[in-house]
Amino acid sequence: MKLGILSCARRCYSTRRLVEAAAQRGHDVKVLNTLRFAIDLQAGAPDLFYRSKLLTHYDAVLPRIGASITYFGTAVVRQFEQMDVFSANSSNGISNSRDKLRALQILSRHKIGIPPTAFVRDKLDVTAAIERVGGTPVIIKLIEGTQGVGVILAESARMAQAVVETLHSTQQNVLIQAFVSESRGRDIRAFVVGDQVVAAMRRTAQGDEFRSNKHRGGKVEPVILSYEYAETAVRAAQIMGLKVAGVDLLEGRDGPLVMEVNSSPGLQGIEEATRLDVAGAIIDYIAAQVDFPELDVRQRLSVSRGYGVAEISIPEGSDLVGKTLQDSPLTARDLNVLTLHRGTSVVPNPKSHRLLEGGDRLLCFGPLDAMRDLVPSRTQKRRRPKISQLPTSPVTTEYNVAPSELGAEG
């Protein structure tokens, strides 16, 4: 395999380890400075130039796109995608995860725990937003901050108001987020590769610091995740569109809360804490994808006129409830069910004798007009209760699941 690592820091630990792991496995690997690419666009012939020369063929690329070059870096990754070169992380996935607001907006429509969060622009809305996320103390975050930079703990509403107004005055966009007190100064970094958590560590802040990032002096230790935490991390990465990701989780009273999904996670902290070959797991995954690539059905299947992929939700009381897939109108309408989502479970390629239940969501491929006819009229969503009205329960999270449940590297 000929692999290109897109990185502006060839001497940093993560890049060096990835090069080392690829070379040990006999792959041809080169570090390509992301900023030295030039994109050429012609009808039917997308091309890339590197250092003013036409780029030779690569089987795969591994993007390590820094926050400061997100726009240009994702454009380069997107060009590789148009040239049918496999990328470990998609350009959309990198863009989704890099913007904290966009990431939480995407995650919020799925049944994945996230800290209650508000985004406002007018100073008159700040006080009400603080109340909606559960009151003070609250966390104030810059939308594009990294490594704990731009994260502030506001102990009072007055302080929060002042911080938000100050940041707004400098044209910064900020999030107001609930402070998860039971996880104060502590979080979990789960390293996801493909559909597995290959390594995980707990980060603990030192002294009066509430941020647990290693760059802020946080202490790290290996941890074996429960199935619930590992599944949440993998699903969060997949929803973002990432195959290599660092998912940061808070240990909430009712289970894991996804704080952030990082598309270019550092390797030094996780490898030193766990003593696992995380770089090797990444290289092995990419090599397997080059030999047998997964396809993005959104791009591959929607090109047939009138056909596409869509999700059909089955509400309670629907005529489909209680019927098998075979006996439902789906088969007669030439619709193929790719996956069935039920609660937090995902059933790929469900059998024809499976009974449908209210609340099921079916990812289908077939004639779009046939699927439109099955979609019920929209109904008004019920308002959610305020945070203060929700019941609470004590912490019950445990970390005693066998590594076999997490994959070979977990």
Image: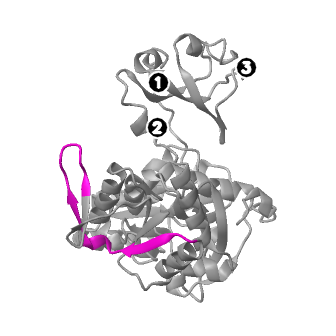
Q: Is residue 163 above or below residue 391?
A: below
Kindly identify which residue carries mark 1: 379
Residue drawn at (67%, 58%), measured in percent from left and top? 230
- Dot 3 or dot 2, earlier in sequence: 2
Residue drawn at (53%, 63%), measured in percent from left and top? 245
Q: Are marks 3 and 1 in contact (CB under 8 Å)?
A: no
Residue density around tag 1, few if under 14, some if 14–19, many if 20 or more, within 10 Å: few
Image: magenta residue range:
26-47
- How far is mark 3 from mark 2, CA to CA? 25 Å
Label 2: element kind: helix
- Dot 3 or dot 1, earlier in sequence: 3
- The residue nearer to you, when weighing 108 against 83, is 83
Which of the labelled discs sits on residue 301, or is there none? none
Residue 247 can be seen, yes or no: no
- Dot 1 or dot 2, earlier in sequence: 2
Kindly identify which residue carries mark 2: 297
